[in-house]
Image (tube, rainbow, N blue to C red):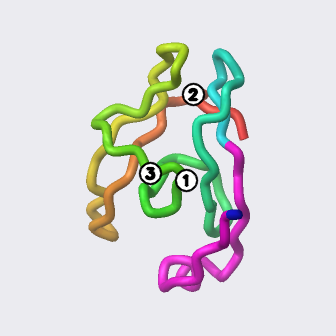
Amino acid sequence: MIKLKNDEYRSARGGYSRLLKLKCRKCRRTIAIYQKDGPGPLRRLYIDRMDPKPKAKFLNCRCGAMIGTRYIYKKENRPAYKLYVDAVVK
């Protein structure tokens, strides 16, 4: 059972959160469960909001599709994955 995190990032985005099941656009296989805070499109995946928490430099599906690249989001100094355009389905 996954619980929503209630921290300063959630409250900074208006307190609106939801859980998303992220799937590969190519094969429709589930990649992760992600807590999305606030409105707007999904551009990056914060690692502390993902289940399971990947450790690789690149986020790949088992079918070989590239999903995103790991980096440090400078504005909040948090590790995240920068998503490639149309890589996932919510």
Residue 25, compared with residue 48, is above or below; it is above
- On residue 51, the disc is 1
Q: Where is the C terminus found, in terms of image quarters?
A: top right
Picture layout, residue 36 above or below residue 24: below
Quick check: is 51 in the magenta stretch? no
The local secondary structure at tag 1 comes to: strand
Point out which mark residue 61 bears: none
Q: Which mark is residue 53?
A: 3
Q: Position of residue 45 (x, y in %)?
A: 48, 51
Disc 1 from disc 2: Cα separation: 18 Å
> Residue farthest to the front?
1
Q: Earlier in the sequence, mark 1 or mark 2?
A: 1
Q: Residue at x 45, y 22 (%)?
A: 66
For the residues labelled 3 and 1, the Cα–Cα distance comes to 5 Å
Do labels 3 and 1 touch, CB within 8 Å? yes
In three-dimensional space, the C-alpha distance between marks 3 and 2, rounded to whole angstroms, equals 18 Å
- Where in the figure is residue 52, as x and y percent of width and height? 51, 49
Residue holding disc 2: 87
The magenta region covers: 2-21
Quick check: 74 left or right of 8?
A: left
Give amino acid for label 1.
Answer: Asp
| Above or below: residue 3 compared with residue 60 | below
